[in-house]
Amino acid sequence: MEDKIQALQKIIDESKHIVFFTGAGVSTDSGIPDFRSQDGLYNQKYKYPPETIISHSFFLANTEEFYRFYKEKMLFLDAEPNYTHKFMAKLEEQGKSLGVITQNIDGLHQKAGSKKVYELHGSVLRNYCQRCGKFFDAKFIKESKGIPVCDVCGGLVKPDVVLYEEGLNSAVINGAVAALQSADTLIVLGTSLVVYPAAGLIRYFYGKNLILINKSVTPYDENADLLIQDTFANVLPKIKL
């Protein structure tokens, strides 16, 4: 492991344009469960499968049940950024990082200080009335009784989160692709890389160093220039910034 830590240190020191690609595993140390691990949301028992609940069609047909699950299992408003979030923000502050491409919806990258964040799946922090477009924060959703409705027009309020069956935001995709194509190093952390189309974006990286840091295997492991299968807590604090 020490050899891999040294290799990572050397790559970061020599890189000028790093891009990070993050998944749910990055936020587990902040108390937010991931999806596919043993204790993740997809391995818990509910009346409906979580994949079904967080789909567009379920949101429309079973809105109250959707929000019951969403408020209980997807809103962690007291969560704070952990060392990994702060590590990425520090490298951006130093001018070495072009930003973060994330599948996460918790807003912790920005809370840690990252300025350039491409949120592929949206954010729980943004919510809009589907009738008049009024903005509502996450606290409004969390504290609402039953289905949250607009206090102006009575319209249904929907999180600005990309549900299953919904397309990704084209402007976010274009920004992420541009960042990837400009990067000399791509560091992928805490994602299984099985959720498409988001996972497929790393194919737009043509730089020198593809680094994967993840506890479990991914479909891209054999393509990595540096593969570290360990926890972030055992790796990133050993890197000097």
Image: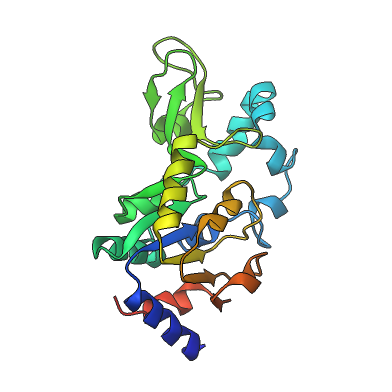
The answer to whether residue 22 is seen in the rendering is yes
Q: How is the image coloured?
A: rainbow
Q: Residue at x 39, y 11 (%)?
A: 152
**Quadrant housing the C terminus:** bottom left
Q: Residue at x 44, y 56 (%)?
A: 181
Most extreme residue toward the top, as rendered? 153
In-front residue for pair 223/100 = 223
Above or below, comparing residue 156 to residue 142 in the picture: above
Most extreme residue toward the bottom, as rendered? 3
Q: Residue at x 31, y 80 (%)?
A: 240
Most extreme residue toward the left, as rendered? 94
In-front residue for pair 85/92 = 92
In-front residue for pair 120/200 = 200
Q: Position of residue 145 (x, y in %)?
A: 51, 25
Q: Residue at x 35, y 67 (%)?
A: 87
Quarter occupied by residue 125 = top left
Q: Position of residue 12 (x, y in %)?
A: 37, 75
Count of residue discs? 0
Q: Is residue 83 left or right of residue 189?
A: left
Above or below, comparing residue 27 to residue 148 in the picture: below
Quarter occupied by residue 67 = top right
The answer to whether residue 80 is seen in the rendering is no
Q: Position of residue 53 (x, y in %)?
A: 68, 36
Q: Is residue 132 left or right of residue 201?
A: left
Above or below, comparing residue 25 to residue 120 in the picture: below
In-front residue for pair 114/11 = 11
Q: Position of residue 11 (x, y in %)?
A: 40, 78
